[in-house]
Image (tube, rainbow, N blue to C red):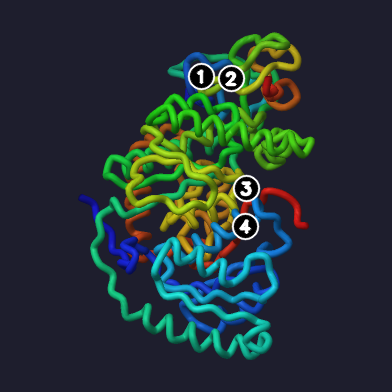
Amino acid sequence: MITFNGYKRPDGRVGIRNYVLILPASICSTDTARMVANQVEGAVTFTNQLGCSQVPSDMRYTMDVLAGFAANPNVYGTIVVANGCETCQCNLIEDEIKKRTNKPLVSFIIRRDGGTIKLIEKAVREARKMVMEASSLQKEACPITELILGTECGGSDPTSGIAANPVIGGLSDLLVAQGATSILSETTEFVGAEQILAARAKNQEVHDRILEIVARYEQHFINNNEDVRYGNPTPGNIEGGLTTLEEKSLGCIRKGGSTMVNAVYDYGKQINSADKGLIIMDTPGNDASSIAGMIAGGAQICVFSTGRGTPLGSPIAPVIKITGNRETYQLMEDNIDFDVSPVVFHEQTPTEMAKSLLNMVLECCNGKVTKSEALGFTESAIMRACNFV
Amino acid sequence: MMENALLIHNKDDVAVVTQAIATGDKIVYADGQIIIAKEAIPIYHKIALRNIRKGEVVHKYNNIIGEAISDIEVGQHVHIHNVKSTAKK
């Protein structure tokens, strides 16, 4: 059994990082949260553009990501920073977090606590205490079955479909064979390939759910007099050589490897510890919001293929960047962790490179930081259902 | 001669060129099959392996990636100028 060194959490899950999360309830508290996090080594935060002026269906996604980030096992404990009058009320966020985990949780509200400066003093002190508690934890050897991998592709080009995504698919197959969990995401990039995925469903229910999330996504655009095919492929995808959304999709789903699809999760929902193997999460093709959904689901680590190259990281989980485009790797070596272009030129097989990628994932689980972590990238976004009210 | 195009599935209508191609270049793919490029093709873009008529579907990954919006000759660049998404019916 493969093991990795992780932090055992009181809720039974295992983290590979040990952060204190300063969680901004809404845009109105996001700068205050940043000021708190900047003051305390070991604290992380992100820009939350949402949290207010949202109708229930839109707010649901935001709440699931906020609570899911707090529950992610890479987080030791959470300090919620709220303004006080936002849609995502502090007590609602606390309730959602408590449904998912019993880890340390403290909240501050700008209005209640006497404005930003007084809040910052209180929250920094609490964060200081929490990172010191967190630092006393020791890592322990944990079975690979505790690992949830998020897979993502972005800035795709044809090398993504022929090299990088097959390598990620190989990694997914290796992890699934070991009893771990792998998430295939990006519903927009199932369009044109949904029948292939549905044919791999564990049962009729999962089969129907795969087709349902794709139809629902397409309908969402139709309701807005748009077509999901406009804007996708993106200008960068097209310049790289991808012609249609179907072509992009057929390359995208190769990240899911070849195993059975065991479950389909809605965006940002916490993945049940009993659901192992390959699962699908309904996320946008947009990288930052797709990754946020999987991390909210509990993924401790993500692998991200990028033919065109992107610096994107996450505040909560390491994101390993891989490319099949040799020129992109040479241009963006500071941002990209793994060059799988040998697959394009028949120098190595996807299976061989998947084994190397598994070793890289395990090293990263054990503490080695990715390039996006070393450079401090924390780009985050949350899926939307509609416009602000 | 070194292979300079990748055929993903032997039923595909297109291959992906793995180097920048100029008009008249020899394209070698799938264990030595050869066609001549009729035009310049950027690296990782697609080249037609057979004549594709307007309205026919185009295959890559042994699946449909779209339909031809004009006649495409073997050796031509296949991209947004001659293929479009197969709209949802």
User: Against A334, is A354 above or below?
Assistant: above
| Residue beneath the point at 33% across and 56% down | A362
Residue A61's spot in the image, x, y percent?
A: 60, 54
Locate the C terminus of chain A and report the quarter of the image it occupies: bottom right
The circle drawn on residue B64 is 2
Which is more toward the observer, A242 or A150?
A150
> Dot 2 lies on which element?
strand
* Distance of label 1 from label 3 (alpha carbons): 26 Å
Q: Nearer the viewer, mark 1 or mark 3?
A: 3
- Mark 2 to mark 3: distance in Å? 24 Å
1 or 4: mark nearer the eye:
4
Give me the disc on residue A4. Answer: none
Q: Chain of mark 2?
A: B
Q: Chain of mark 4?
A: A
Q: Can the viewer see residue A94?
A: yes
* Crowdedness near tag 1: few (<14), some (14–19) or many (≥20) residues, C-alpha within 10 Å: some
- Amino acid tagged 4: Ala
**What residue is shown with label 1?**
B62
Is residue A341 visible to the viewer in this orientation of the structure?
Answer: no
The residue at which mark 4 appears reads as: A381
Q: Which mark is residue A286?
A: 3
Q: Looking at the image, which is closer to me, A354 or B29?
A: A354
Check disc 3 and give the amino acid type.
Asn
Instruction: Give coordinates of residue A45: x percent, y percent.
Output: 56, 71
Q: Chain of mark 3?
A: A
Dividing the picture into quadrants, the one containing residue A183 is: top left
